[in-house]
């Protein structure tokens, strides 16, 4: 009866509250112990890759308000339990995830590394840090709080890693504390792939210089990034779909307007059949329109990205129109950055904020492939000019 009353009140508040915008949703449910059925209080519920979250009350109930529409992983976490994830496609104004059962963690003794094993662990950890944290502009200011919680092993000249608890990370360059829920990590001499979800907590400082530094570093990290590219690509597609001056513009004009948005933001895209290091005489780079890459998804904020072979992406920092001759080869511009994209499946879903969530759905090479955990920004981050 109490649960029915709780959900009735939640439903009533969602349907009739003037404070909830039509573009957002509320997620509610309950968290209990899988073995005993007892409610779990103070369990953390996070909207993955955001700063959004809440905790359960003494009866195990929770509600997260004003959740953006789209596809998200919801993480359920408690220090005494194994974390659990649910993927939700958020379309309605209210979503009941039901009862979530968490499994109690087996008791673990504190990690002890004997002297003979320490050098091996240190070598593995150094390799892990290089590939996981990265070696970009933010890496020196990014550290893992308790590295000894991470387990390593090697097989067939590959390094693997796992962690039962979220990896706690402090990024003083971008101003975030991060909990990273690692699903998979594998690294060799030729590639690195990992997957997981982040939860962000902004760092707090009384110094105005810190907040200014964080804002500048966030913008610099974002510009030219993979997320920046996907965001502008989606913005261009939105422009293509939209009407001009109250009536639909000719398709040719809409395509040109949309593609120009990529160029204005410094991006130029081409389709190629081979990677240059695989063939000393690769096929030509063929310009491709943004309109040929995207199609509508099931949710208004999502699009389907699809292309064959490889997509080459050039990025010119601080690009200015008419700075270069019309037929000037982009590849020969001194500060140009280049990346390649390859789809690991037929298509992937991306959203208007530059996220994609199909695990290992896109294989990146070049500049995009250098981005690591130290470059992560939360979903809510927006660049003012996008």
Image (cartoon, rainbow, N blue to C red):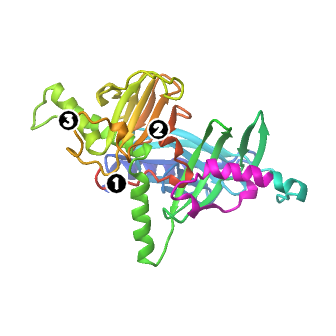
Estimate the spatial distance between the alpha carbons at disc 3 and disc 2, rounded to whole Å.
25 Å
Q: Are marks 3 and 1 in contact (CB under 8 Å)?
A: no
Numbered label attached to residue 318: none
The answer to which of marks 3 and 1 sits earlier in the sequence is 3
Q: Which mark is residue 257?
A: 3
Front residue of 94 and 286: 286
Any part of residue 1 in sight: no
50 and 222: which one is in front? 222
Q: Give the range drawn in magenta.
A: 121-150
Asked whether residue 204 is drawn in magenta, I would say no
Crowd class of label 2 (few under 14; some 14 to 19; many from 20; radius 10 Å)? many
Residues at marks 3 and 1, CA–CA distance in whole angstroms = 21 Å
| Residue 272 as seen in the image, left or right of residue 21 | right
Q: Main secondary structure of the magenta part?
A: helix
- Where residue 59 appears, as percent x and y from the top left, is 61, 56
Give the mark, 3 or 2, whose residue is nearer the N terminus: 3
Image location (x, y in percent) of residue 34: 71, 45
Q: Nearer the viewer, residue 266 or 184?
A: 266
Q: In which quarter of the image is residue 295?
A: top left
**Can you tell which of label 3 and label 2 is closer to the viewer?**
3
Q: Is residue 219 left or right of residue 126?
A: left
Assess disc 3: are there few (<14), some (14-19) or many (≥20) residues with their C-alpha within 10 Å of its C-alpha. some
At 38% from the left and 51% from the top, the residue drawn is 223
Q: Mark 1 points at which residue?
A: 383
In which quadrant of the rendered view does residue 278 lie?
Answer: top right
User: SS of the residue at dot 2?
Assistant: loop
Q: Which residue is drawn at 25% across and 44% down?
A: 264
Residue under label 2, please give it. 356
Q: Earlier in the sequence, mark 1 or mark 2?
A: 2
Distance Cα–Cα, label 1 vs label 2 = 18 Å
Q: Is mark 3 on a helix, strand or loop?
A: helix
């Amino acid at each position: 009866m109490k649960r029915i009353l709780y959900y009735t009140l939640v439903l009533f508040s969602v349907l009739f509250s003037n404070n909830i915008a039509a573009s957002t949703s509320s997620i509610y449910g309950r968290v209990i112990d899988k073995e005993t059925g007892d409610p779990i209080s103070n369990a953390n519920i996070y909207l993955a890759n955001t700063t959004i979250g809440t905790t359960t009350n003494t009866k195990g109930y929770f509600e997260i308000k004003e959740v953006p529409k789209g596809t998200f992983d919801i993480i359920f976490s408690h220090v005494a339990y194994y974390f659990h994830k649910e993927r939700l496609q958020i379309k309605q104004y209210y979503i009941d995830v039901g009862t979530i059962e968490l499994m109690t963690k087996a008791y673990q003794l504190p990690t002890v590394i004997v002297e003979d094993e320490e050098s091996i662990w240190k070598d593995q950890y150094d390799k892990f840090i290089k590939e996981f944290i990265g070696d970009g502009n933010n890496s020196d200011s990014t550290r893992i709080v308790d590295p000894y919680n991470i387990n390593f092993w090697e097989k067939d000249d590959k390094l693997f890693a796992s962690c039962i608890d979220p990896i706690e990370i402090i990024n003083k360059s971008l101003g975030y504390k991060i909990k990273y829920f690692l699903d998979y990590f594998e690294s060799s001499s030729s590639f690195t792939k990992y997957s997981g979800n982040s939860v962000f907590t902004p760092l707090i400082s009384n110094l105005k210089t810190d907040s200014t530094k964080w804002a500048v570093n966030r913008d610099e990290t974002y510009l030219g990034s993979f997320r920046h590219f996907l965001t502008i690509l989606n913005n261009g597609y939105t422009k293509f779909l939209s009407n001009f001056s109250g009536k639909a513009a000719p398709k040719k004009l809409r395509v040109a307007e949309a593609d120009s948005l990529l160029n204005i933001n410094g991006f130029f895209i081409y389709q190629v059949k081979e990677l240059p290091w695989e063939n000393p005489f690769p096929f030509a780079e063929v310009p491709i329109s943004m309109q040929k890459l995207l199609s509508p998804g099931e949710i208004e904020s999502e699009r389907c990205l699809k292309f064959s072979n490889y997509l080459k992406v050039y990025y010119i920092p601080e690009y200015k129109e008419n700075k270069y001759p019309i037929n000037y080869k982009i590849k020969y511009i001194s500060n140009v950055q280049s990346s390649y994209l390859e789809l690991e499946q037929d298509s992937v879903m991306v959203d208007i904020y530059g996220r994609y969530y199909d695990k290992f759905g896109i294989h990146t090479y070049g500049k995009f492939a250098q981005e690591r955990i130290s470059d992560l920004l939360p979903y809510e981050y927006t660049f003012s000019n996008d």
